[in-house]
Structure formats: structure tokens, C-alpha cells
Amino acid sequence: MINSGNKSIKKKAYHHGDLRHSLLVAAESLLARKGVAELSLREVAKAAGVSHTAPYRHFRDKRDLIEALAAEGFRYLTRESWKIEQKYPRQPEKQLIELGWRHFYLALEKPAIVHLLFGDVLSLKNAGKELREAASEAIESLIRIVKNGQKAGLYKKTNARILALAAISMVHGFSLLVISGRIPPPLSGRLQVKYLGKALADILLHGMLKRHGNTR
Amino acid sequence: MINSGNKSIKKKAYHHGDLRHSLLVAAESLLARKGVAELSLREVAKAAGVSHTAPYRHFRDKRDLIEALAAEGFRYLTRESWKIEQKYPRQPEKQLIELGWRHFYLALEKPAIVHLLFGDVLSLKNAGKELREAASEAIESLIRIVKNGQKAGLYKKTNARILALAAISMVHGFSLLVISGRIPPPLSGRLQVKYLGKALADILLHGMLKRHGNTR
DNA sequence: ACCTGAACACCGTTCAAGT
DNA sequence: ACCTGAACACCGTTCAAGT
């Protein structure tokens, strides 16, 4: 994702050779520092050491470049999902919880990317194939983890897509509230967040209602 | 706040008299049609029939105007919350569910506003007092409804702020996925959405886990 | 007080032109 | 093939000037 080995110390070559990748790296860095609203294609080009029209050789327009960044984000979640399944083969509940944390940590580390994934900047309807497929694969890998739990008799027999939707709604809603600073002070402390995450996972699994013999 | 008594119907007065309000109306309309990214202050001014520098008499900058729109959104949720409490005085569970629907319907009707409320365009930290207070009141009114349920012995005794956080995470996460088109086709049908909302409310209250004697 | 036009430093995108 | 500078139609914001 962010592995540019070529810090070309050489005197700048005619043909960059890796410009597309360099542009993506520069764009992600700028995105992280200033947010989508302030992300300027011209500035990205300058950061990559290239004229402000060069990016158009590799991306149809600004939106196309942003979609490429978002697709990378979805692919990251898909990869993590696979890793988790392999790491905890017989523990579907653990799989779901872990995937939730990965999503949440991604939000903490790269909030701008996560805003891209589920925000209003990109609409999946008008998006290119690369982004649509990446998003769809991320969803499917979550659904697979939910189905693992259902096969183990763990979850309700509700449609797996709906259970997955509930999980992603909770996780993403929480992540979003945290990274956009919507959690009011008494709860927003650094260390509190881990505790909050656990509490929400518990509610997702067991619900808000008081259960008989359970007054937690 | 938006109570300018002088509705001078006279042929366009020198002094508009209600320009601030007119600008907000024009801005909301433009916002709804084109999204924040495309919202131009110059265009807002033109829509209000005024020069492109006139808005600066009423708003410090573009962000200030956007914050005013967002504050109005939070206040709407706060008002709805009060109404619901009065309408269903002894039914705290109903109160919570209804508030969730109001939030969701607001998202369907004014997606751009809801993106403003919880998106990355505005950060509450740097926001002006008006927006911060409006946001805080909306949260508090949700917490009050959660506490109503706790007093009735309905919910777990977890910190009410945390229960409220779980509820808003679920509701907002779901709303966001719907309005940003992230719900994949098999689930995204028009009529399905009401059904989905009910399913998620059930999961929020009862959890994902299969309960003894309950195989729903 | 309230509004204006000109001006400044930016944008995204297109295009003929260079190598 | 890949990159460039000039050009176009936009931005947000500032400011001296008008009434």
C-alpha cells in the first residue's frame, strides 16, 4: 500500500515509470494531512514532482484518483478479514469482534480513508468497477464471517446480510462518531475508547435490554 | 435566532432585512441538490439575489454558514426528541425506537444535512459555540430517553451515555450506509428499508446472539 | 450599516505543443 | 508514450469604494 522503495535520488528520469503509484502515495499523505475537501490535484502533482497536468495520464479526473484510494481501503479490510479467519478458524465470534477492531483501528489511523469508504464524497452507484468490486468483496468477507457464526449455531437465523449490516452499522457508526469528535468529553478520553468498544460489542451481541438474571 | 420581524414586502429594499435567513434557505437548497463539495458561496449569493461578497456581512466564512445549517439539523433532532417524549410519556422503548426512525427519515429526506451532522466536513472541536451547543443538546436529549428506559427497568444498568452511544452508532451507521448507497442490491430495495430498520432495532435491543428458546 | 466590483491566489480540466 | 505551459471558467476571501 505505502511501499515506495524508489526514493529516486537519481536525477529525475524522463519517464517516471511509477508515476501512478507515486501519485497515490502523495495523495494519501495529503489526504491524511488536510482532508478530502482540501485535497488538490495540483498539489498532489507537485508533491510527486510533476506538472499539474501529468496526473491526467493515469487518472481520468480527481474523482478517479480518490476512488483508487478508497478501493485500496476496502481491499485492506478484505485482506484483514481473510487473515482473521485463518488465525481463529474455529472461533467465529472472535472473528467478528476482531474484524470490528480492525475496522475501528483503521478509522483511528486513517480517518480520511474511512470517511472515503462510507462518506458522501464517493457514491458507489456512479463509481468505477475497481471501487465497486473492492467494496463488494469487503462486504462479502464480512458476511462470510457472520455465516461462520451461524453455522456454529451462535447467531440468530436472521438473513446473514442483515446481521452483517447490523454489525457494520454499529462498528462504523461508532468509528465515525469517534473520528469526527462527536463523542462528548466524559466519554472521549484516549483510554476510554477501548473500553467503549468492548461495551458496544457486548451490546451488539447481547442487546440493550436487561436480560433475566443479568443486570450488567 | 432566525426571528427577524421585518418582513418588508416592499419592492426589493436596499437593505434586504432578512438576508441571513435567505442565504441559509438558498444554501440548504443548493446543498441538497449538489452536496457539500459542490456548494459554492458565490452561487448561494447569486441564488439569494445578492453580490458574491454580501454573505460575509452575515457569516465569517463559508464554514460558518455550513455550521449554521448543521446546527439547525441538530436542533431539529432535539425538538423531535422532546415531541416524542411528550407523545409517548410512559413508553420509553417506543421513545427510543421513534427517535431512531426520525433520525433515519431525516437522513432519507436530507442526506446532505445528516452527512454534515456526523461527517468529516465539520469538526466539533473547532466549531463555533452555536453548533457545539446544538450538538450537545441533541445528544443529551437522546440520553434522557435512554435514562427513561433505565428508570423503567428496561435496559441494562450500563452507563446511559454508553447505551446512547450504542443506539446512535447503530442508527447513524445504518442511515449512512443507506444514503451513501453502501447497501448491496439484494437488500437495498425501497420497501426493504423499513423492514431492515425493524430488524436492526431488534438486534440493537436483543443482540445478535441466539437466545435460549428463541431462534428468530 | 449594508452592499458592490475589482483584484488576488488559488482550483479542475482541456489542449496544442514538445520530447 | 509521456509530460509540459498556456488558457478557461470557476473558486474563497479581501478591500477600497459606493449609498
Image (cartoon, coloured by chain):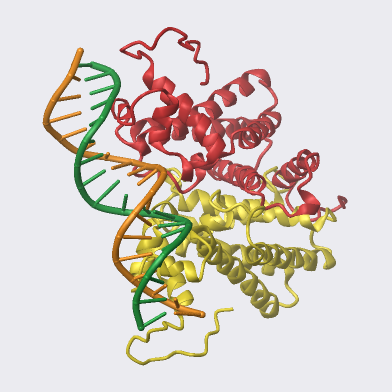
Chain colours: A red, B yellow, C orange, D green
Q: Does B79 sit above or below residue A131? A: below
Residue B102 percent across, percent down from the top left: 57, 67
Q: Does B11 sit above or below residue A27? A: below
Residue B127 showing in the rendered view = yes
Residue B109 percent across, percent down from the top left: 46, 65
- The picture quadrant where one finds residue A189 is top right
- The picture quadrant where one finds residue A88 is top right
Residue A91 percent across, percent down from the top left: 70, 26
Which of the two residues, A84 or B153, is positioned nearer the viewer here? A84
- The picture quadrant where one finds residue B163 is bottom right
Q: Does A64 sit above or below residue A205? A: above
Residue A7 percent across, percent down from the top left: 49, 12
Which of the two residues, B129 or B60, is positioned nearer the viewer here? B60
Which of the two residues, B152 or C4, is positioned nearer the viewer here? C4
Q: How many marks?
A: 0
Q: Does B145 sit above or below residue B118? A: below
Q: Which residue corresponds to the image point at 52% horizontal and 16% vertical from the top-left? A: A3
Q: Which residue corresponds to the image point at 35% horizontal and 63% vertical from the top-left? A: B43
Q: Which residue corresponds to the image point at 55% horizontal and 48% vertical from the top-left? A: B120
Left or right for A104, reference C19: right
Residue A133 showing in the rendered view = no
